[in-house]
Image (cartoon, rainbow, N blue to C red):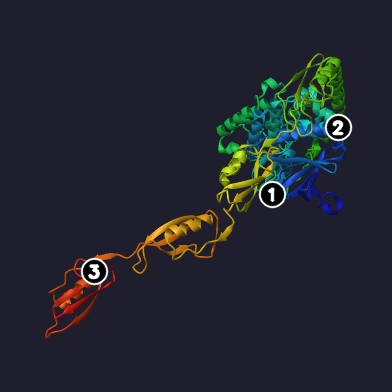
Amino acid sequence: MNTALSDPLVGQLLDGRYRVTRRLARGGMATVYTAVDTRLGREVAVKVMHPGLAEDREFVSRFIGEAHAAARLSHPAAVAVYDQSADSGHVFIAMEYVPGRTLRDWLRDRGRLSPRETFAVLEPVLAALAAAHDAGLVHRDVKPENVLIADDGRVKVADFGLARAVSSATATGMLIGTVAYLAPEQVQRGAADQRSDVYSAGILLYECLTGHQPHHGETPIQIAFQHVNSDVPAPSLTRPSLAPALDHLVQRATCRNPIGRPADAGAFLAEMISVRRSLSAEALDDSPPAPVPVDERATAAVPIAGAVPAPIPYPQATTPIGTDGSFALGEPTTAIPVPARFAGRRRRGAMALVALLVAALALGVGGWRLAAANTVGTPSLINLSRDAALAKARSSGLKVRFGEERFSENVAAGQVLSTDPLPGHPVAKHGWITAVLSKGPERIVIPSAIAGAALDDAKQQLIDAGLTPGNVTHGYSDTVAAGQVISTDPAIGTGVKREAVVNLVVSDGGRPTRVPDVVDLPVDQATKILQQAGFVVTTQQVDANNAPGGVVLAQNPGPSSKAAKGSTVTLQVARGPVLVTVPNLVGMPRGQAEAQLRKLGLAADVTGWGVFGNRVASQDPAPGTEVPTGSTVHLTVF
């Protein structure tokens, strides 16, 4: 179906900036579209919250806070968050658009990956998670749908920080959608830290190597129960050719006790790189083993908690990553087919499996009831003042400690912006709630030093201040030199949001004006006229025998042309004639006298009388006289 016809948002302009072009995917809490950022002229992905969630003020406030936290994460393997806003009831975030596919799509096509391919995907995933953990941000929803593989092979992780924002508002949906990757502590207490992301990444590692998830069940609660009570099986049980080091890596990351896992994604990444370097090329490029007969006794001996499906034939797909265009959110992998010869055994064991699940659920429910007797639900403190939050928590038998304050566009300064645990989540009686107070909207003042700065320097000042250089336009200025910043939009000194776009106006110098004609004027007079007109004057001395010294012979720019005030006008000034001394030519043969005059740059005018007429009798000017080059000397010969 054409989404442009069925989806009313396609073609709309959100927030006066984002032109929605097409729908990519629809998930449990939002719909993702491609859009064109008309201000910056780039394609982005826009995630628009479903209307029901957008009407929940508490959810919107929490979502905005988490979006701001995610926007501060800058890493090549993390999908960048550009903007967050609302328009006509549509709450949305604008983020980096990654043309390609999800890891879920890739696994669906490939079945499972070689260890080398698995490392190529998971190492950038862990690098992005490590950057988030260093920044105090926990992803909480690591799964194949949130791993994007671009058309050019780059791997990026999406939805940083957003899982926490939606966890309480959509608790049931989140459990159903991501239960296959939840750490035991998330299932039991709703608590998550860096080690919870490590657990989810370990499940991702298992799934890449085997082609299926480690735990299976008819309902989400059955799968959740297995995360809490059963270890993740070694991937080599499904794929015997895998190196033992890969089993150990999976078991380390998916230890049910968080203490047994790597401390964070950075530590897990270091262990993964160490394992990769220790494996041979053959182990890294492990090809699927030939089918082997299944030992029915061995199959029966596998405990139900660690049971794994039959091995999946490895497809020989050679399609490169991301050849089908834009990514779409994938669906959970389909059930693994069971060979026909095991169908009877499966039916015979069905009753035992049901009985085991019932007993397990009974134990679990009993444990949860016991835990619930010693816990209370976290009250909502959002938008309360410090004193009001303390009083409300005290009325529930809880205590509040206040963490580092954060900026917020939507929660007033001094009011509670977020809490950990989230409202409604269980916390031990007489326990603690960590609350974050709002510092109000963050505003960055456009630096005053930008005025008069060179363009590149002004742009760097904006970047250093946390702002974004925008469009550059030019204008004339009689006071700001060409190439320097005249003004900004918004104006210098204005407080704006972080990453706000600041446009710059750069001087082209003064407005062009007519250059006065000063040719043939004395240089002093010409200089005064030009300076009064707003120009800078330089001079060049040139020889000129036919002009008196100090007179302007030419100018650049020429007379009556236009130039900016403050620009330079160059004057060519006559140095005056070059003087030479007339030699004594009396008594010298005529030819010799004429030759000597020519050598000095003088001309000869000869008159004569007498019989021979071959020697100089007199000359004018007299010997020793200084005359300009080119002058004529009159000679009388006899």
Name which quarter of the figure residue 95 lies in.
Answer: top right
Say if mark 2 contacts mark 1, CB within 8 Å.
no
Name which quarter of the figure residue 382 lies in.
Answer: top right
Left or right of 207 in this view: 461:
left
The answer to whether one can see residue 285 in this image is no
Count of numbered labels shown in the rendering: 3
Tag 1, which secondary structure?
A: loop
**Is 120 in front, or is 64?**
64
Say if mark 1 contacts mark 3, CB within 8 Å.
no
Disc number for residue 317: none
Residue where numbered disc 1 is placed = 40
In front: label 1 or label 3: 3
Tag 2, which secondary structure?
A: helix
Residue 404 at x, y = what percent?
A: 70, 24
Q: CA distance from mark 3 to mark 2?
A: 126 Å
**Which amino acid type is marked by label 2?**
Arg
Q: Residues within 10 Å of mark 2 (few under 14, many from 20)?
A: few
**Which amino acid type is marked by label 3?**
Leu
Q: CA distance from mark 1 to mark 3?
A: 73 Å
Disc number for residue 347: 2
Residue where numbered disc 3 is placed = 600
Q: Please tell me which residue is depicted at 82% across the width and 14% down the height of the picture.
A: 429
